[in-house]
Image (cartoon, helix red, strand yellow):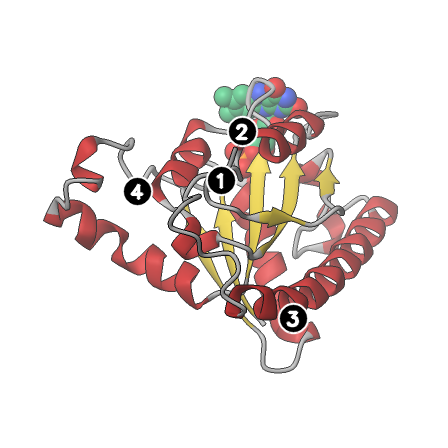
Amino acid sequence: MKVAIVSGSHRQPSQSIKVAKLIRRRIGERFAGAQAEIIDLGGNPYPLWDQGIWDGDPAWTERLAEPKRILNESDALVVVSPEWHGQVPSGLKNFFLLFGPKELGHKPGMIVTLSASEGGSYPVAELRMSSYKNNRLCYIPEHVIIKHVESVLNDDPAQNDAERDTYLRGRIDWTLGILNEYAKALRPVRESGVTASPDFPFGM
Ligand SMILES: Cc1cc2nc3c(=O)[nH]c(=O)nc-3n(C[C@H](O)[C@H](O)[C@H](O)COP(=O)(O)O)c2cc1C
C-alpha cells in the first residue's frame, strides 16, 4: 500500500502534523512494503486556486508537481484535519480544488480529525458532505476523532493520558487495517476502466 497523508493545519508546528507523522510511522511498521508520504499544508504552501491552474500557468505546474507525484503514486489517502471554528481549515478546502479525479478518484480515504477540546465532529461531517463529489475520493465508513489531542499520541509517554492514548493508538491501527483492505479492493475498480467516462466527468 502507498498512502498519501495530507496534514490539514496551516499552523507550524501543529497537532495535525504530529498525528500525520504518527500515522506515517504506523503504516511503515504495520504493513510489509507499505510506504506513506505527507503533504503538509503547514505554512500555506499552495496559494488559493486561481484560473492559472486551468490555463496551464507554468508556476502552478511546478508548484503542484511534487504533491501530484505523491498522490498519483498513492492508492489511499489519509486526511488529517483540525477543527477550526467548527470547520476544516480553508487550506484543506483549497487542497480539494487543486487536486481532482486523476489524483484521488476511486481511492479510499480515511478521515482523522482532531481538537484541543471536545471538537472534531464537524470536520468529519464537512469532509463527508462536500470534499469528494468531483474528485471521486471514496471515504471509508470508519473515521478517527481525536479529542484533547495535546494529551495523546505524544512520543513522550509522560505527556499522554495513558488510557486515551492506548485506545486511540489501537483505534488508528484498526482503521488503517481497514483502509489497507479497501486500497487492495479498489485498485481493480480503477483498473477496470468503468470509472472513466467522457460523458460524465463530474459528480452529480
Ligand atoms: C483558528 C482556530 C479555530 C479553532 N476552532 C476550534 C473549534 O471550533 N473547535 C475546537 O474544538 N477547537 C478549535 N480550535 C482549537 C484546535 O482544536 C486546536 O488548536 C488544535 O490543536 C488545532 O490543530 P492544529 O494544531 O493541527 O492546527 C481552533 C484553533 C484555531 C487555530
Query: Residue flagged by tag 3: what amino acid is it?
Result: Lys
Query: Residue flagged by tag 4: what amino acid is it?
Result: Pro
- From the image, tell me which residue sits under label 3: 184
Disc 1 vs disc 3: which is toward the camera? 3
Disc 3 vs disc 4: which is toward the camera? 3
Query: Residue flagged by tag 2: what amino acid is it?
Result: Val
Q: Earlier in the sequence, mark 4 or mark 2?
A: 4
Query: Residue flagged by tag 1: what amino acid is it?
Result: Gly
- From the image, tell me which residue sits under label 4: 45
Q: Earlier in the sequence, mark 1 or mark 3?
A: 1
- From the image, tell me which residue sits under label 1: 8
Q: Quadrant of ligand 1?
A: top right
Q: Is residue 11 visible?
A: no
Q: Earlier in the sequence, mark 2 or mark 3?
A: 2
Looking at the image, the residue that sits furthest to the bottom is: 32
Is the residue marked by circle 4 packed among few (<14), some (14-19), or many (20+) residues within 10 Å?
few
